[in-house]
Amino acid sequence: MTRHLDTEVIVFGAGAAGLTLALDLARRHVDFVLVDKAPEPFPGSRGKGIQPRTQEVFEDLGVIDRIVASGGTYPLERVHTADGSLDRVAVATADPTPAEPYRIPLLVPQFLTEQRLCERLAELGHAPRRGHELVGFDQDAGGVSARIASPDGELTVRAAYLVGADGGSSTVRKALGIGFPGKTLGVRAVVADVLVDGVPDDAWHRWGQGSPDQVSLCPLRGTDMFQLQAPVPFDTDVDLSAAGLTALLRARTGRADVGVRAVSWASAFSMNARLADTYRRGRVLLTGDAAHCHPPTGGQGLNTSVQDAYNLGWKLAAVLRGAPEALLSTYEQERRPIAESVLGLSERLLEAARSRPTSRGREVSQLDLGYPDSPLSVTGPRDGGGVRGGDRAPDAPVTGAGGLPTRLFTLFRGTHWTLFGLDVPRGSAPEPRAGLHIHLVGAGGDLRDGAGHVRDAYGLSSGQWVLVRPDGYVAAVVDASGLGTVASCLDAAGVRAARPGAATAAATPVGAA
């Protein structure tokens, strides 16, 4: 017997991207179903690097401290050679600043990251429906009808939108006939989560660096396992058992005292770099690995996927609550160029790693990525190094008028837009709108910038206003004469001024799925 369900959004794929999207929709009171073909959560460590910009996203979603506690920072690299071993920094780090509170990449096995996201989703009253396979869908002008095979029989779901977050071999992308051009990068590798005897967990051990017979063991923070990585030939079968990986490890290290005691998860795969021809067809969208496929170098794949979903969530919610449909088009306009540039970075790092040890710098942090060419960004000259439309909105410590310390990131946290003015006259703020928080920074305002961190981080002059999007990017920096532009930005995003006696759509919550 076929069961029927009506909802607003279907999310297919409960990996990092799908879970991030589900979290954002849940906190916006959007009705959705999150389904995944696999009967159990993904068990591997594959995407283990959490970059600083993604840490900022996780703070906004309310999970950053749990994720930090689940892993740790990257260890030193210990390069083993015939002449001995050499310890060196694996990942370049920098001390936090008021504007950039997260500047150290984290090492957290992917399965633990996804577990923390699932726990947060449960707090919001939702859970993935596992063992649910998308067998087909149709769309029309009003929505999407999906046919799902579940453990309890066939389920038909009707929704306004369907999002494919189902990985590099995406069923959704293939059903849409969207091309996935790119290339195989000439590298086949084994990645496995293993219990190992004979090596300490104080370093990321590397042998044969730059040769076809290289192998590495990286301790997985938050577990007692190592991640084993090794390139392997294309034309051979790989034994992924404990005995097979022990033989590989001993052959490449030249050490008989090193052995694999158990294998938790293992995969042999060919590295690819691919980018979907489009991220959207009608009412069906792609996000994460369904839209782009990266080599693992630089720890960019999972991070780019999480930030895709973070970009898409607020736009889907806004359109469902009455914002212009054009807002949804900015998802691909903003995120596809980011994926294209990140793919180039990952390939460059892979090529460098083939020949020599490489240290990763600021370029992998994703803090400098932005949307200056977006239709949502009001750009102007970058006077004195200040921020402009499309830039990441910096953090800054401030003090509330009541005397308690806080941060801009704390004020940004949530589903709203934020508008703040520096040293603006009292009474000059625009009219309130549902979905907009307004702050005055300076004497007579609700916030104090005693140390000048806001002024410095944003490069502001007295009398200027900054409009910050729900995903933490600057939409506009204007003076008082530009507040009409701010109003237009908000109107375009569906954040409209309330009419007397009428409730706005943005202020009306929808029941949770």
Image: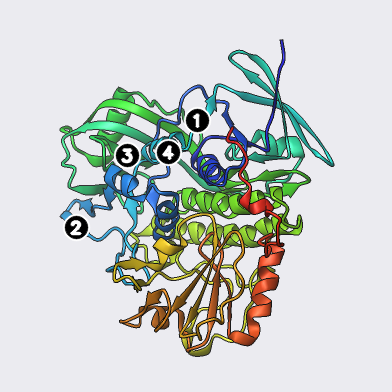
Disc 4 or disc 1, which is closer to the eye?
A: 1
455 vs 35, left or right, is left
Disc 1 or disc 3, which is closer to the eye?
A: 1
Disc 4 or disc 3, which is closer to the eye?
A: 4
Secondary element under disc 3, as helix, strand or loop, is strand
Disc 2 or disc 4, which is closer to the eye?
A: 4
* Viewport quadrant of the N terminus: top right
Q: Position of residue 400 (x, y in %)?
A: 35, 71
Nearer to me, 186 or 275: 275
Give the Cα separation between the discs numbered 2 and 3: 18 Å
- The residue tagged 1 is 127
- The residue tagged 4 is 114
Q: Position of residue 415 (x, y in %)?
A: 53, 54
Nearer to me, 167 or 310: 310
Give the Cα separation between the discs numbered 4 and 1: 12 Å
Q: Are marks 4 and 1 in contact (CB under 8 Å)?
A: no
Give the Cα separation between the discs numbered 1 and 3: 28 Å
Q: Which amino acid does label 1 sit on?
A: Ala
Q: What residue type is labelled 3?
A: Gln
Tell me which numbered mark, 1 or 3, is placed earlier along the sequence: 1
Nearer to me, 433 or 459: 433
* Viewport quadrant of the C terminus: top right
Label 4 environment density (alpha carbons within 10 Å; few <14, some 14–19, many ≥20): many
Tell me which numbered mark, 4 or 3, is placed earlier along the sequence: 4
Rendered position, 355 above or below 450: above
Label 3 environment density (alpha carbons within 10 Å; few <14, some 14–19, many ≥20): many
